[in-house]
Image: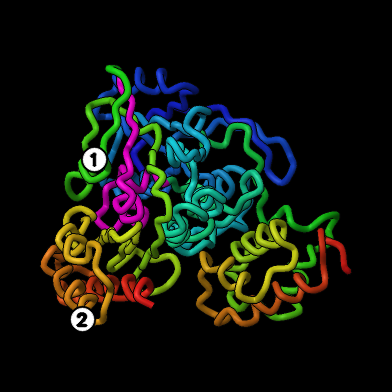
Amino acid sequence: MKYKVSFFVNEEPVELYVPANMTLLYVLRDMLNLTGAKDGCSAGECGACTVIMDGKPVNGCLVLAPELDGKHITTVEGLSKNGKLSPLQEAFIAHAALQCGFCTPGFLMTATALLDEDPHPTREQIMKGISGNLCRCTGYKSIIEAIEDVASHYEGGKRI
Amino acid sequence: MKDFLYQAPESIKDAISIYQQFQSSAVIMAGATDIIIRMRDKLISPECVIDIKRIKALYGIEFSESKGLLIGACSTLNEIAENEYVKRFYPFLAQAAESVGSKQLRNRATCAGNIVNASPLADTATPLYVCGAVIEAEGSEGKREIPIDKFITFVRKVDLKPCEIVTGIRVPHIPGIEGEFFKISRRHEVDLSTVCGTVAKTGGEYRIALGAVAPTPVRLKKTEALLSGRKLTASLIAEAAELAKSEISPIDDVRASRQYRLDMSALIVRRGLERFAS
């Protein structure tokens, strides 16, 4: 059986018929061709599938497709505006906060939600905030520095 | 994941009637963080998933001195960890809620789900055990309250009648209770407890519960009795830590050996009590 769901992805309204046994992650990847969110562990342990749902970061692999009715989803594809990367995306590039890139969309979404909640977190709060995301390349240092950079120079997406 | 019928009722009554239609082939889903994994791993293959997150009556965290804390079945672990009443009157419950999984997971996972799952290592269980929390359930025959230590009966077994749904958790107000939640795990974040526990004090009484050391979380009644009303000296603490080991029956598994769990249980009891001795 298919379920009709109407929701928003990156502020665009979407209407789909989805099977019950599909997760949000695969609605994004296979039905909407938004392949930024990655399938790392399918068990809520790696954070590679992190997206923002109704303002909060969640694991895309742990949300059922029919649950999406009425929800607002932001994915990594929604971070840039008018072709311009977000300050956090720019900071990830400037600090080389990635190597293979597989975990990067998840980190960007977790960190975006973290900075939306508190624009100026401490280093400790940043480390705690990203603890649900695994990176096997960087050793995290450059990722933390990229987030710190935005935390000390931006508020509400504007440079201060 | 096998296909299933997805139902999202908007009232407890509707949820129960759907549950009655499907009986044991239906599963109740709140935060979904365990259910989806168990379906994907084919540990369960329900015909119907009843998502209770559209039921408004199952939300909210309320507190009053007479009624204590009421946690709605759909309240998330992050909501519990950040709640001012929980932090003030049940700080060890806030610590436990925050120790589960990751931030992303806690934005979905619920305390009620953690308890209904009835894993021996459920992090939110031991704070509820020391407070004598009560599980509120509702079925076709009405509402029922079950003390948590009677509710969790074995590994993944709870005292719910067919088609009964957990609607909330009530935690009595215990004036002046202080305590700490301990979690021993291989890594600090996103890991299951190797051993967990809560050590609390109210007046001259101590309340101690441990998880992942027996088929269910356990209150250490003998250890509590030993300590009752006595001044905490180094030798009494050592005696209590030793006695605690006799009240648990840990096993060897992938996370740790039985011996390690015994040693860590004694450590939790000792550290928990030392806080009150100084």
Q: Which residue is mark 1?
A: B151
Q: Position of residue B88 (x, y in %)?
A: 52, 54
Q: Indicate yes or no whether the magenta region holds residue A106.
A: no
Quadrant of the rendering where the N terminus of chain A is positioned: top left
Chain of the residue where label 2 is placed in the rendered structure: B
Chain of the residue where label 1 is placed in the rendered structure: B
In this rendering, the answer to whether A147 lies above or below B17 is below
Mark closest to the chain's N terminus, 2 or 1: 1
State the SS at label 2: helix
Three-letter residue code for mark 2: Ser
Residue at the image point whose x is 85% and y is 54% from the top: A82
Which span of residues is magenta-colored?
Answer: B111-139
Q: Nearer the viewer, mark 2 or mark 1?
A: 2
Q: Position of residue B66 (x, y in %)?
A: 44, 36
Q: Is residue B265 left or right of residue B198?
A: left
Q: Which residue is mark 2?
A: B235
**Colour convention of the picture:** rainbow
In this rendering, the answer to whether B242 lies above or below B57 is below
Q: Position of residue A76 (x, y in %)?
A: 67, 57
Closest to the observer, B84 or A37: B84
